[in-house]
Image (tube, helix red, strand yellow):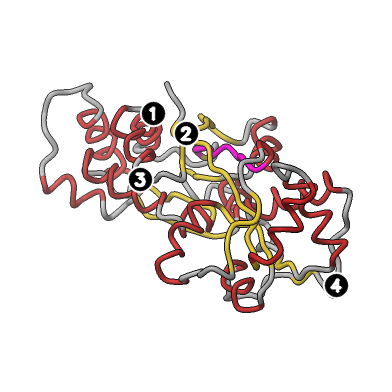
Amino acid sequence: MHNRRRALIRMSAAAAGIAAPALTPAVQRRSLDDPFRLAVDQALADSGLAGRLQRGFGRDTGVAISVWPGPARELLAALERGEHDGALLNTPRAEEELDRLGLLRDRRQIATADFLIVGPTLLRAGIDAMHARALAAQALSGLAQAGAPFVGATEGSGTRELEALLWRTAQVAPQAPWYRPSSPGQGALAAARANRACTLVERGVWAAAAGTMRPGKDFGVLVEGDPLLRVPVHAMRSFRADHPAGRLFMKWLSSRTGRQAIAALPAYRPVSP
């Protein structure tokens, strides 16, 4: 393992332009034995962002990344234990807790994502009547007063962190029977569509699901554009794991090609260097 990681150090330096030699196929194949483990919030995987970055980084450097999707808070705990080498997450409040304790390396914003409140379009008129440009908290308050069915995001996910903030801002405690937690094995968006309910969804996930879900005229976006719905996407490395490819990956994310890979998905806005 030590020798493989040493090989990755040399390979990373070459790929970053520190040394002139090009990567050989043999060295590239060797990296597959010890890939960089990247923990990714499920939404960032479902939207296609994680896969695009994985492929772009591999194409540009020859270094392998393995993507591990799941709820962000669970992944953060595993990152803190050193079970993952790095992470791509959208849970700024949870991340800040570990960052303040010095348990993360190189945490930096690489993009901005935004979220949507979606649901049966017949509810749109009521939301629009509240305000010329309905704010998310106001909309949630109105939906709660009307008892409109709402499917909650997966516990521990980045979407759930934002959803909790929105309910607090709206001064509403979501509860049954109109509020339903998402079921294991079924995403909140699919559950909302099946049950004609509302939910909070990341724009990238909504765009990726559009082709397969075919929302139709009766199910669509109810609220968008509220600044409160914008969430930073951060990349970071584990303090307890120091994979040689980590610094190279962080450098690549901030490079022109890394930013182009992010911008290729219209749902994300890359951060300027």
What is the number of callouts on the image? 4
Q: Earlier in the sequence, mark 2 or mark 3?
A: 3
Q: Position of residue 43 (x, y in %)?
A: 53, 56
Q: Earlier in the sequence, mark 3 or mark 1?
A: 3
Using the image as rendered, state which of residue 47 and residue 206 is in the foreground: 206
Q: Which mark is residue 176?
A: 4
Q: Amino acid at mark 4?
A: Ala
Residue at 20 percent across and 29 percent down: it is 14
Q: Position of residue 113 (x, y in %)?
A: 53, 42
Judging by the rendered image, the residue that carries numbered circle 3 is 53
Q: Is residue 243 visible?
A: yes
Q: Is residue 138 magenta?
A: no
Q: Amino acid at mark 1?
A: Ser
Residue numbers of the magenta segment:
229-237
Q: Earlier in the sequence, mark 1 or mark 2?
A: 2
Q: Amino acid at mark 2?
A: Ile
Question: How far apart, in angstroms, are the residues tagged by discs 4 and 1?
Answer: 44 Å
Q: Earlier in the sequence, mark 4 or mark 1?
A: 4
Q: Is residue 236 visible?
A: no
Residue at 74 percent across and 54 percent down: it is 127
Using the image as rendered, state which of residue 68 and residue 128 is in the foreground: 128
Q: Which mark is residue 110?
A: 2
Question: How far apart, in angstroms, are the residues tagged by discs 3 and 1?
Answer: 12 Å
Q: Quarter of the image holding residue 17?
A: top left
Characterize the local packing of mark 2: few (<14), some (14-19) or many (20 or more) Cα atoms within 10 angstroms.
many
Question: How far apart, in angstroms, are the residues tagged by discs 1 and 2?
Answer: 7 Å
Question: How far apart, in angstroms, are the residues tagged by discs 2 and 4?
Answer: 37 Å
Judging by the rendered image, the residue that carries numbered circle 1 is 254
Q: Are marks 1 and 2 in contact (CB under 8 Å)?
A: yes
Q: Main secondary structure of the magenta part?
A: strand
Q: Position of residue 101 (x, y in %)?
A: 69, 32
